[in-house]
């Protein structure tokens, strides 16, 4: 039996510019940790090789330190690693791969396939389709069918691109791969990269997905694939292995009836250190409910890895009791009364937000004097 790990889309050097600097740094660091977990899994499962189907790096211009750190992360598995360039780290005439070679950063047991020619390693006949530019409209796997390989070795395709016929009609995907390529080229397995979620294309063709989730989409990411082959011609047995640390959650909460607030607060309090959250809250609430939500979000932001909350669709509907509870002397009292009158005249006007700010300000001040 031959066993290997299939992984792809490490995107080492990804910047995560939509987050603040501290969170972005932690998310970038998690990608190195995912590679280290892949190395440990390869050793634990005693695989014959690890195949990386492109986009090892997120960009050509990653720092030299990043190159050294990435290849050091492979040290947990001493067997062969086989890599191809993808669209983010294409094998250009001058690329991140040539720079890694000049820096002597690539260990001897790492095989970087920069040319489309068979590689015999670890009892596998590997047919690589490296991208030599970011975008191509030719199918670089076409040569697989005519490639001669030893009859007693499994034929494994390694490619990065979009299998035709899977995307929605009308989408013109670059870096195309013909549907049915595995069968047409007599492959025992076709290991693909480019899609960031795990997906089976057919019995012999899979996308591994990125090993560390990097977007708010339920696409079954954060995994590597353990592939077992009994020999040439046998159908592969494929098992996903968890590799990711963080859960990316796109949550939507709606406050329609009073009891929804308690449910929303419990949901927010459930976020933990492994969660990267994009939260949208809609509906309506009174001043007291708005304050409780704000407090819960502050608490949760201290527990979750990242928490971005959007309350634009949440209507504030202060009650008369809410406005009375804001009672203050002098000029501030007059402002509160005027805002209350304005709110009755125009419920969706600026008075609503002004009252919410005042409620928070007064609540903080009164809490500080206790």
Image (cartoon, grey):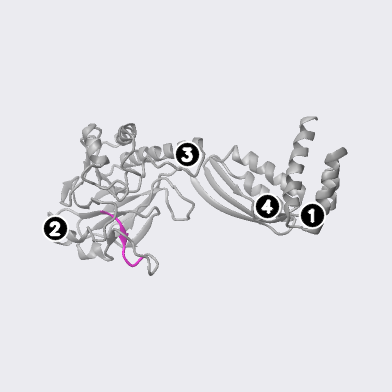
* Residue that sits furthest to the top in the current view: 369
> What is the C-alpha distance between the residues marked 2 and 3?
44 Å
**Where is mark 2, residue-wise?**
147
Residue 203 image position (x, y, % from top left): 30, 62
Crowd band around label 3 with a 10 angstrom C-alpha radius: few (<14), some (14–19), many (20+) = some
Residue 347 image position (x, y, % from top left): 76, 57
Q: Is residue 367 magenta?
A: no
- In the displayed structure, 260 sits above or below 121; it is below
**Where is mark 1, residue-wise?**
343
Residue 15 image position (x, y, % from top left): 42, 41
**Where is mark 4, residue-wise?**
263
> What is the C-alpha distance between the residues marked 1 and 3?
40 Å
Local secondary structure at mark 3: helix
Q: Nearer the viewer, mark 4 or mark 3?
A: 3
Measuring 71% from the left and 59% from the top, which residue is drawn there? 256
Q: Which residues are magenta?
A: 159-166
The tag earlier along the polypeptide, 2 or 1, is 2
């Amino acid at each position: 039996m031959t066993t290997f790990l299939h992984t792809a889309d490490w995107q080492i050097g990804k910047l995560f510019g939509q987050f603040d600097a501290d969170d972005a740094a932690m998310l970038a660091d998690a990608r190195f940790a995912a590679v280290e977990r892949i190395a440990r899994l390869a050793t634990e499962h005693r695989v014959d090789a690890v195949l990386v189907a492109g986009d090892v790096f997120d960009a050509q211009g990653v720092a030299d330190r990043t190159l050294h750190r990435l290849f050091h992360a492979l040290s947990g598995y001493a067997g062969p690693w086989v890599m191809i360039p993808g669209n983010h780290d294409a094998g250009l005439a001058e690329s991140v791969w040539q720079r890694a070679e000049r820096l002597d950063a690539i260990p001897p047991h790492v095989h970087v396939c920069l040319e489309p020619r068979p590689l015999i390693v670890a009892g596998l006949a590997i047919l690589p389709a490296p991208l030599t530019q970011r975008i191509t409209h030719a199918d670089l796997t076409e040569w697989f069918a005519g490639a001669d390989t030893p009859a007693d070795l499994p034929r494994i395709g390694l490619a990065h691109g979009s299998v035709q016929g899977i995307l929605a009609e009308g989408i013109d995907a670059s870096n195309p791969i013909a549907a049915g390529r595995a069968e047409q080229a007599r492959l025992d397995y076709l290991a693909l990269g480019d899609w960031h979620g795990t997906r089976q294309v057919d019995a012999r063709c899979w996308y591994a997905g990125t090993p560390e989730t990097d977007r708010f989409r339920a696409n079954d990411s954060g995994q590597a694939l353990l592939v077992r082959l009994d020999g040439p011609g046998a159908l592969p047995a494929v098992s996903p292995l968890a590799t990711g640390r963080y859960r990316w959650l796109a949550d939507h909460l709606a406050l329609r009836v009073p009891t929804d607030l308690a449910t929303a607060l419990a949901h927010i309090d459930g976020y933990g250190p492994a969660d990267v959250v994009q939260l949208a809250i809609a509906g309506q609430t009174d001043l007291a409910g708005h304050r409780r939500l704000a407090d819960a979000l502050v608490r949760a932001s201290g527990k979750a890895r990242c928490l971005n909350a959007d309350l634009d669709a949440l209507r504030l509907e202060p009650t008369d009791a809410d406005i009375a509870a804001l009672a203050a002397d002098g000029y501030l009292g007059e402002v509160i009364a005027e805002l209350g009158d304005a709110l009755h005249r125009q419920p969706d006007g600026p008075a609503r937000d002004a009252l919410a700010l005042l409620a928070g300000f007064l609540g903080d001040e009164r809490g500080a004097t206790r």
